[in-house]
Image (tube, grey):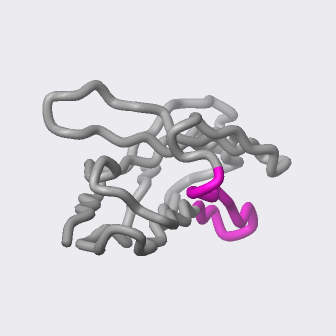
Amino acid sequence: QVQLVESGGGLVQPGGSLALSCVASGSIFSVGDVQWYRQAPGEQRELLATINRAGDTKYTDSVKGRFIISRVNAQNKFYLQMNDLKPEDTAVYYCFAKIADYGLQTRDYWGQGTQVTVSS
């Protein structure tokens, strides 16, 4: 059974920083692309950043220059460093990963979500 578990959300003042973590555990052969999403109340889930196994990254314009996605392949750990946070960054943040098990079947997995609130 493969799981993605996130941590690191919380309350932060505008201009502050938070670091989100996501750990994959279980019968994992390899982890492919990892993405971070967020969903604000009443809004659709929004893709923020993508990192492939080689470490190549992509960002949506709203977070480019403020957020940094990273990963440690050997530990199946993935991160989203969020800087210069704004009230409009308030949302539930999710990690997503394509994970191959030892049967070499690749499936999509979501974390449980972690709340980030940016407010003074």
Horizontal and vertical percent position of residue 13: 29, 74
In the image: residue 62, left or right of residue 85: right
Q: Is residue 66 magenta?
A: yes
User: Which residue is at a point 26% across and 71% down the rendered structure image?
Assistant: 10
Nearer to me, 55 or 101: 55
- Residue 85 or 107: which is nearer the viewer? 85
Q: Residue furthest left?
A: 42
Magenta span has 18?
no
Frontmost residue, 69 versus 27: 69
Q: Residue at x 51, y 66 (%)?
A: 83
Which image quarter is the C terminus in? bottom left
Image quadrant where residue 59 sits: top right
Percent of width and height locating residue 41: 15, 37
Residue 20 shown left or right of residue 42 in the figure: right
Residue found at x 21% / y 66%: 119
Q: In this picture, is 37 found above or below 73? A: above
Percent of width and height locating residue 23: 50, 64
The single residue placed furthest to the top in the displayed view is 44
Count of marks placed on residues: 0
Give left or right: position of 50 versus 97: right
Q: Is residue 96 visible?
A: yes
Residue situated furthest right in the rendering: 54
Judging depth in this view, the residue of 48 and 15 nearest the camera is 15
Q: Can the viewer see residue 112?
A: no
Q: Which residues are magenta?
A: 65-78
Residue at 28% over, 55% down: 87
